[in-house]
Image (spheres, rainbow, N blue to C red):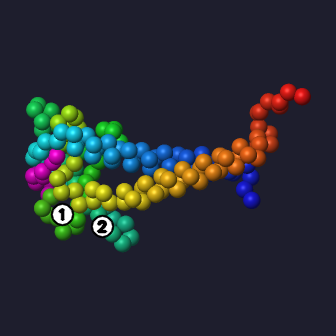
Amino acid sequence: MMSPRGRLVVAILFSIISLGLATITVDRAFTEAMISVGWKAGAGTVTKVEQTRSRSVTSYWIYYSFDVGDRKYERRSMFGLLKKGTEIYSADRKAFAEGASIEVIYSSLAPSINVPVNDPYRNDKSVFIVIGALLFGFIAVNEFKNLRKNGPMPGSLSKPGPS
């Protein structure tokens, strides 16, 4: 049996995880919606290639930029706050060396919202992210309900009711 403080910590932690996963889902949906409203295609240039390794997998990431008018744009996520790389298949890494051309589609309303035309991992893990957001959210809500049902925590600063 977990203490009330432990339940509160778990509920808060799971709420934060759920909100983070939900934000990722909303960001992906927002990007898709903005591009589908009015999209344009353009040519970009690969500006950086990164290689990451784990115990069993080597992943390759590219970063690109492209020009619209007199402004330069790059791929960003979290509603334009973070620079985002694009994972590519290892077989394609030579085709996407620095300076290589890459086709990009972008929102005509906001070119900062863009994706490469052939993003091989575009919807990768989306189902797991949605399921994770729902699962962690459900557990957090359940923990908050249990805390509320069992009353205030011992030693909390709640006022006693009228007697």
Q: What amino acid is labelled 2 in the image?
A: Thr
The N terminus sits in image quarter: bottom right
Q: Is residue 135 left or right of residue 31?
A: right
- Judged from the image, the secondary structure of the residue bearing numbered disc 1 is loop
The number of numbered badges drawn on the structure is 2
**Badge 1: how crowded within 10 Å, few (<14), some, or many (20+)?**
some
Identify the residue at horizontal 37%, vertical 57% (top origin): 126
**Can residue 48 be spotted in the picture?**
no
Residue 101 drawn in magenta = yes
Q: Which residue is mark 2?
A: 58
Q: Is residue 55 left or right of residue 73?
A: right
The CA distance from mark 1 to mark 2 is 11 Å
Where's residue 51, x and y in %?
Answer: 27, 60
Where's residue 4, x and y in %?
Answer: 73, 49
Furthest residue in direction bottom, as rendered:
56
Q: In the image, which residues are magenta?
A: 97-105
Residue 35 drawn above or below residue 136:
above
Identify the residue at horizontal 12%, vertical 45% (top origin): 41
Q: Is residue 134 left or right of residue 157?
A: left
Where's residue 137, x and y in %?
Answer: 54, 50
**Badge 2: how crowded within 10 Å, few (<14), some, or many (20+)?**
few
- Judged from the image, the secondary structure of the residue bearing numbered disc 2 is strand
Q: What amino acid is labelled 1 in the image?
A: Arg
Q: Which residue is mark 1?
A: 93
Q: Mark 2 or mark 1, which is nearer the start of the sequence?
A: 2
Furthest residue in direction front, as rendered:
37
Where's residue 129, x and y in %?
Answer: 42, 55
In this rendered view, identify the residue nearer to me: 160 or 96: 160
Furthest residue in direction right, as rendered:
163
**Can residue 40 be spotted in the picture?**
yes
Q: Which mark is residue 107?
A: none
Identify the residue at horizontal 59%, vertical 50% (top origin): 140
